[in-house]
Structure formats: structure tokens, C-alpha cells
């Protein structure tokens, strides 16, 4: 069992958990992920490592309630524990030698973008963070991004906070104003990453995206996480999760992410009703 | 007077049309009477040819003699001396090419049903004997085993019996390897696997699940944690795909993914949290035991038509004859001499069909089997909405890529000597990680050999 040391709701649908997992805490680097199971009969879900504390032996994860399992995860109190927690999985983000980077995060993807911004900042890279949310209530990690960046742009779809617009608008503006980035690192919904990659391709700026497809084991065994990158099949769990955004077949990835859409939705509704009965 | 019947006592089975709708065990096991009657068919040959056919060298005539005497615990003790997982082997070993292939009774008629007798004895022990196993005196040496599959568990069991302090590191959340994620419940009930693993824990084996060696900890770090020798039994878990167009459509799975969802994650049960795709018409590509397992699972999930699509003929099929027969009885349709060339998809990118070509057999190839050659203009469409690729697996490169000086061959298999020693001192390996995908019992044999080598190495160190 893996105890939950700290639990904090970042917004109504996004929660942070600090979990005791000493072996993972010692090894995990920015860009890597873990797989957890909530209970004995739980499914295995991958979540990116948001932060680690090797001395305390803890790993921070941030998740959004999107289905039955994250709903259950959100109901475990501080002091409770997770049945399983394995990692670190995947290849760490390659950030050595970068001088100036634009980190683009969308929604809960900011939870993954933040540790990368932090790692870049710590190695002395100039970091411009562009983070987008649907509205003011959903903004997360604002302080953290400010501490890890030389410039932060907050975008909201409805203009209720920061600037109104999409992250791609802000990125385009910065590039057009003469900012020269070695690389753009984009993490968020598939559609957002697709459009960031389309934009940066026009400007010829190298772009890395972090893929989070359906997977089971996370060690290369099931192949459920496969995607097409540069015409070749790759496994996100062992070859990624970071890939060249200009090479990823996003349309295919979007289709594949919908494999269990109907089943999942049904399952989530059932779980919600279950919790409603309890509360 | 021995029983001179030319045929084995038949194994009682669930009716094919009942069992193809449930996940309960297909073969029901001998009764005591059947077991004793079958045991009487054994001639108790002095030269014991059957033992030579067993990768873990169980004293077969001796345990069968105990069944004749109705000393079932005595029979169990003889088997257990050589095998850590008898209830598993009695079910999934290909006895027909091993012990039973060497049986003198097989020269005229059917060999003695050694596998069924082994299963009978192991099941009897599990259901009737509650005895704490004897603990070996600890010798103070620590050994790490990577992977809790058949090879690792056997190696761990043998070393624990010899007094070593053994820790098994397992990447998944439960121990068992292919026994829990691959082989379906109806062929190997998971309660049996868990019972065998509990026995290992009782003799002192520690199992650390959720630990990926190569990620959370490296082989070299295990040495610095105080382990004096390491056994790698990480298996061959990487699925292969064909590389044909359409393989990434929704509804195309590796057999690993399909079986893992069903067996490890219990997706066949109504209370499961992990989903699995219920195809209406399913094609399983491949002709091995894994393909049979996948096809029979698909049928049990309610598919109307399940096809085995195999490019050679029935004679070349690598699956056990028994598995092929069971699949046929359950209504699996065999499309042999048939090869997929493309998977087609609908507007939502879900599988809508599979384009195949007919094959014929040409000259023998490197494997000694006749090479399948495409028949010209033989293309046809198979109406399916789900495709399961079961064309083999390769060793996982995770440990190789994080262990300096660990030699592997062109296929990614770890290179060892006959004793299981790798190119690194104190590091041993066995099972599918060394041979590529093979059988449970060969992996167990390799685990056993390595345990002996590790014992010798640490005694002389």
C-alpha cells in the first residue's frame, strides 16, 4: 500500500496528491510517469510525475476527474492509501543544453508542463510559460509557474482571467514579436498539442509534445499505447511519452483515445451515482 | 497386474457448447478411481525414459507408484522435490512432446497420462493438506530475482529451499507473470497460481510487486543493496505487429493487450473496472497457444464468429494439438493457408474488415517447415470488427539497456552459458528472456538450472 501524505484540491476538478513511494521518488525525473491502482479491482491508470521529494520518499501527482477511476481516486482522503503505485516509467524529458524555451500547458496538462518548466529553470534555461484554461476557476499552479519562469502568460477561453484566447494566439504573438526559442514544449489536450505543433512547424521551431494514450502495463508489454510518429509505430510508454510534435499523427492518436469512450462514460456515471448515494 | 488398455483414461471436460460461454476451467480433472486406474498403466520402467523428457526431471515412475498405493501425499512430495509449481505444470506443460513422448506405453497405443496424474496429485494436495512447509536453515546469503514468472518463481523457490534469502522483483501488481496475465482462467485458474505463490512465500520468498527493475532500481544498484547474485527472468513481453496498413485502427490489439485485459485485469467480469472490446466477428492472426487462448477468450466474450488466421496449414501449427482440438470443439473457425495484407477501417477508424490472401506451401525454410507462398489473385475480405495479432513476442529491452556489459544476441535475447550465467559476474538469466517466447516448463527448467549455478557460485565465492 502507498499512503497519501497530502491531498489538495487545486480547482473543482483537479486534485494534487503526495504519495509515499520511496523507490519512485528516488529515481523519477521530469517527463516520466507512474501507474496506479486505486483498489484491489482497480484499473491501471498512467499519471505524470508532477514533483518528487527524494528525502521524504514522496511523489506528487496531479489529476483531473475524467472517469470512474479518477472519481474514486478523488474520494480517497489524506491519510488513506493507494493499492498500487509503480514507476518511474517512460523516458525523462531531454532538456540539456536548451537556452530558451516556451513551455505551453493546457488545462491539467499544466501539471505535466510545470515540472519541466521547473527543471529547465533550475538548469538556467530562460523559460516562457504559456498556460491556458477554460476559465478563471480552473487556473492551477499559477504561483509555481511564476517561480519557474521568466515570463508567464495565462490564457482563458472566456477571458475571465489573464488574456482571452488560446495558447496558440499567445505563442504566435511572442514568436512574431521576435522571441527566439530553441524549442517549444507543449503539453495538454491532443487538439491543443496538434495546433501548437502546426503553428511551430510554420516557423520551423522544434516542438516536443507529451503523449498520454490508453495503456495497461506501461513497460512495453501490451502495445495499447502505440502511435504513429514519423510514419513509424512507437509505444508511448517506453519510447516516450515525449515525441517530436511535428512527426506525431495527432488525428490517429485522437481516434485511438476514443476507443473505450462509450464504456468509460457509462462507467463514470455509475460511479458518480454510487458516490451520490453515499454522500 | 498393470492396466494394459491402449488408451489413456479420458479427461472429463465441460461440454464445449457450455464452456464456450463461461471462463470456468475446461478440463475437470481425474477422480481418484480414474487416477488409480491410469497409474496402473505405468510399467515402472527401470531406465525411466520419461524422466529424461522432463525439463525439471521429476521422478515420474516413483510418484505414479505412490498413486497406485493411494499414498497421494507421498506422490506429492516426490513431485515437489523437483517442481515448485506442479498444479500449473500438470495443466499447461506440453507433455506430448516431453515426458509422455518418451513413455514406453506410447510405442503401441497412448502413453501414460503423466500430466493428468501430476495435476491430480497437486490438486489433491492443495485441497486436502494444510501443512506448513519445512523451512530451510538460513545461510545468510541474499539473492535477487527479477520477474515473478515461471522462471523466476522456480529459481526463487529452489534457492529458498537451499537457505537463501530471496527477493523477487515484479513489475506488475501481482506475481505470476504469464501465468496471470497470459494464460486464461479456463485453462489455468488463477486461484491455483496464487496458491502456488503463497507456498513460496511460506518458505521465505519475499515478493516486491510494482517494482520495475531497470527503472526504479538497476541491476548494479541491487548489488549495492547487498544482493550477491541476481537472476533475470523478465520474459519475452514485447508484442510484435505485422506492419501491414490499418494496424492502428481501433479494434486491433496485440494478443498481450487483449489477454492482459481479460486475465490480469478481469475485464470479462461484470464488476471489472478495466474495459475490453467485445468484437462481434473476431480474427486472431497466428497459430500458437497464445492465438488459441485469444480466440477462445473472444468466443467467451460473446463473439459470433471467431477466426484463427494462419499462413501455414494445420500440420505446421505450433499450438498444442489439445488446444487446437479444444478451440475447434468450441466453434473457432480455422482459416489456414491464409495471410492478412491489410486491415480496413470505417469513418470512425474502427476496424471494418481484413483483406487476406490465400497461401500455399513451397520449399522448406530455415525452421524446417514448408514456406508459405502467396497464391496469385487470391485476395478476399474477411468480415471482422476486431483483429488480434498473435504473431509472437520479443524480450523486453529494459534491463539490457540499463545494465552495462550484459550481452544479448541479435533478437535481444540475453546470452548465457548452459548454467544460466550471463556475461556479467553473479548475474544469471533464464526463461523467455534468454530463449525468446517458449513454454512455461522450459522457463522453469532454466530457473532450476540457474538456481543450482547460483548456489555453486555463492558457496565457492
Image: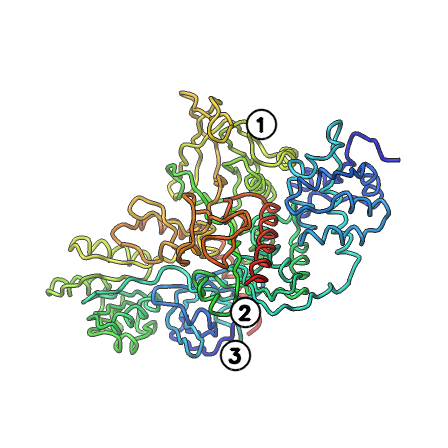
A67 sits to left or right of A147: right
Q: Find the distance from the CA under tag 2 to the CA under tag 1.
A: 56 Å
Residue farthest to the right, as pictured: B1
The reply to whether discs 2 and 1 touch (Cβ–Cβ < 8 Å) is no
Query: In this figure, which residue is indicated by the disc labeled 1?
Result: B315
Q: Quadrant of residue B403?
A: bottom left
- Which one is earlier in the sequence, the residue at label 2 or at label 3? 3
Query: Residue B392's spot in the image, x, y percent?
Result: 49, 41
Query: Residue A195's spot in the image, x, y percent?
Result: 25, 56
Tell which of A47 and B171 is nearer to you. Answer: B171
Give the quarter of the figure containing the C terminus of chain A: bottom right
Badge number at residue A219: none
Asked if badges 2 and 3 are on one and the same chain, I answer: yes
B26 sits to left or right of A3: right
Query: In this figure, which residue is indicated by the disc labeled 3?
Result: A79
Label 3: state its secondary structure: loop
Label 1: state its secondary structure: helix
Q: Residues within 10 Å of mark 1 (few under 14, many from 20)?
A: few
Label 2: state its secondary structure: helix
Asked if badges 1 and 3 are on one and the same chain, I answer: no
Residue displayed at 43% across by 62% down: B215
B68 sits to left or right of A80: right
Residue displayed at 42% across by 51% down: B407
Chain letter for mark 2, please. Answer: A
Chain letter for mark 1, please. Answer: B
Residue displayed at 73% across by 46% down: B59
Query: Residue B54's spot in the image, x, y percent?
Result: 66, 43
- Residue mark closest to the camera, 2 vs 3: 3
Tell which of B279 and A53 is nearer to you. Answer: A53
Query: In this figure, which residue is indicated by the disc labeled 2?
Result: A275
The reply to whether discs 1 and 3 touch (Cβ–Cβ < 8 Å) is no
- Residue mark closest to the camera, 2 vs 1: 1
Amino acid at each position: 500500500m502507498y499512503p497519501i501524505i497530502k491531498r489538495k484540491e487545486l480547482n473543482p476538478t483537479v486534485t494534487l496528491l503526495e504519495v509515499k513511494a520511496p523507490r519512485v521518488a528516488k529515481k523519477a525525473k521530469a517527463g516520466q510517469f507512474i501507474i496506479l491502482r486505486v483498489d484491489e479491482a482497480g484499473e491501471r491508470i498512467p499519471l505524470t510525475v508532477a514533483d518528487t521529494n527524494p528525502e521524504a520518499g514522496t511523489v506528487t501527482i496531479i489529476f483531473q476527474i475524467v472517469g470512474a477511476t479518477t472519481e474514486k481516486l478523488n474520494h480517497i482522503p489524506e491519510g488513506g492509501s493507494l493499492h498500487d503505485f509503480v514507476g518511474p516509467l517512460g523516458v525523462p524529458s531531454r532538456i540539456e543544453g536548451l537556452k530558451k524555451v516556451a513551455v505551453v500547458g493546457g488545462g491539467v496538462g499544466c501539471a505535466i508542463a510545470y515540472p519541466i518548466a521547473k527543471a529547465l529553470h533550475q538548469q538556467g534555461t530562460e523559460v516562457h510559460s504559456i498556460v491556458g484554461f477554460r476559465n478563471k476557476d480552473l487556473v492551477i499552479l499559477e504561483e509555481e509557474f511564476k517561480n519557474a519562469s521568466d515570463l508567464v502568460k495565462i490564457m482563458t477561453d472566456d477571458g475571465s482571467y489573464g488574456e482571452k484566447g488560446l495558447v496558440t494566439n499567445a505563442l504566435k504573438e511572442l514568436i512574431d514579436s521576435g522571441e527566439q526559442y530553441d524549442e517549444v514544449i507543449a503539453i495538454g489536450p491532443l487538439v491543443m498539442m496538434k495546433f501548437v505543433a502546426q503553428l511551430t512547424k510554420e516557423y520551423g521551431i522544434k516542438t516536443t509534445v507529451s503523449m498520454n494514450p490508453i495503456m495497461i502495463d506501461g513497460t512495453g508489454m501490451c502495445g495499447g499505447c502505440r502511435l504513429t510518429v514519423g510514419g513509424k509505430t512507437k509505444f508511448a510508454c517506453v519510447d516516450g511519452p515525449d515525441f517530436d510534435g511535428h512527426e506525431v499523427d495527432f488525428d490517429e492518436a485522437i481516434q485511438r483515445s476514443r476507443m473505450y469512450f462509450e464504456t468509460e462514460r457509462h462507467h463514470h456515471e455509475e460511479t458518480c451515482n454510487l458516490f451520490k448515494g453515499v454522500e | 497386474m498393470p492396466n494394459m488398455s491402449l488408451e489413456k483414461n479420458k479427461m472429463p471436460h465441460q461440454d464445449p457448447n457450455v464452456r464456450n460461454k463461461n471462463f470456468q476451467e475446461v478440463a475437470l480433472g481425474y477422480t481418484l478411481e480414474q487416477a488409480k486406474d491410469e497409474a496402473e498403466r505405468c510399467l515402472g520402467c527401470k531406465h525411466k525414459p520419461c524422466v529424461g523428457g522432463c525439463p525439471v526431471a521429476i521422478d515420474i515412475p516413483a510418484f505414479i507408484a505412490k498413486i497406485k498405493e493411494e499414498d497421494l501425499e507421498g506422490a506429492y512430495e516426490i513431485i515437489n522435490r523437483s517442481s515448485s509449481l506442479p498444479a500449473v505444470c500438470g495443466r499447461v506443460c506440453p507433455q506430448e512432446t516431453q515426458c509422455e513422448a518418451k513413455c514406453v506405453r506410447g510405442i503401441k497405443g497412448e502413453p501414460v497420462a503423466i500430466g493428468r496424474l501430476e495435476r491430480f496429485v497437486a490438486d489433491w494436495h492443495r485441497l486436502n493438506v494444510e501443512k506448513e512447509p519445512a523451512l530451510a536453515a538460513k545461510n545468510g546469503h541474499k539473492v535477487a530475482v527479477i520477474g515473478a514468472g515461471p522462471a523466476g518463481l522456480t529459481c526463487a523457490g529452489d534457492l529458498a529451499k537451499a537457505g537463501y534469502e530471496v527477493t523477487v522483483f515484479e513489475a506488475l501488481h501481482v506475481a505470476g507473470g504469464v501465468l496471470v496475465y497470459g494464460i486464461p482462467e479456463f485453462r489455468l485458474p488463477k486461484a491455483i497460481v496464487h496458491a502456488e505463490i503463497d507456498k513460496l512465500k511460506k518458505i521465505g520468498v519475499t515478493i516486491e510487486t510494482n517494482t520495475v527493475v531497470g527503472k526504479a532500481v538497476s541491476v548494479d544498484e541491487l548489488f549495492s543493496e547487498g544482493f550477491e547474485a541476481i537472476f533475470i527472468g523478465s520474459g519475452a513481453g514485447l508484442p510484435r505487429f505485422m506492419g501491414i496498413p490499418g494496424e492502428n485502427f481501433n479494434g486491433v490489439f496485440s494478443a498481450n493487450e487483449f489477454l492482459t485485459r481479460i486475465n490480469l485485469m478481469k475485464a470479462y467480469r461484470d464488476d471489472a473496472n478495466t474495459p475490453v472490446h467485445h468484437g462481434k466477428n473476431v480474427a486472431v492472426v497466428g497459430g500458437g497457444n497464445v492465438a488459441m487462448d485469444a480466440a477462445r477468450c473472444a468466443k467467451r466474450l460473446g463473439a459470433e464468429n471467431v477466426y484463427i488466421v494462419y499462413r501455414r496449414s494445420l500440420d505446421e501449427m505450433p499450438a498444442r494439438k489439445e488446444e487446437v482440438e479444444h478451440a475447434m470443439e468450441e466453434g473457432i473457425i480455422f482459416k489456414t493457408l491464409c495471410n492478412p495484407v491489410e486491415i480496413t477501417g470505417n469513418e470512425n477508424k474502427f476496424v471494418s474488415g481484413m483483406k487476406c490472401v490465400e497461401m500455399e506451401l513451397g520449399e522448406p525454410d530455415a525452421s524446417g517447415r514448408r514456406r508459405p507462398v502467396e497464391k496469385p489473385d487470391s485476395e478476399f475480405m474477411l468480415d471482422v470488427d476486431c483483429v488480434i495479432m498473435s504473431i509472437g513476442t520479443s524480450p523486453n529491452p529494459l534491463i539490457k539497456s540499463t545494465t552495462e556489459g550484459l550481452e544479448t544476441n541479435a533478437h535481444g535475447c540475453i546470452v548465457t552459458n548452459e548454467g544460466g550465467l550471463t556475461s556479467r559476474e553473479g548475474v544469471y538469466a533464464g526463461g523467455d528472456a534468454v530463449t525468446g517466447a517458449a513454454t512455461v516448463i522450459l522457463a522453469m527448467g532454466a530457473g532450476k538450472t540457474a538456481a543450482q549455478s547460483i548456489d555453486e557460485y555463492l558457496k565457492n565465492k
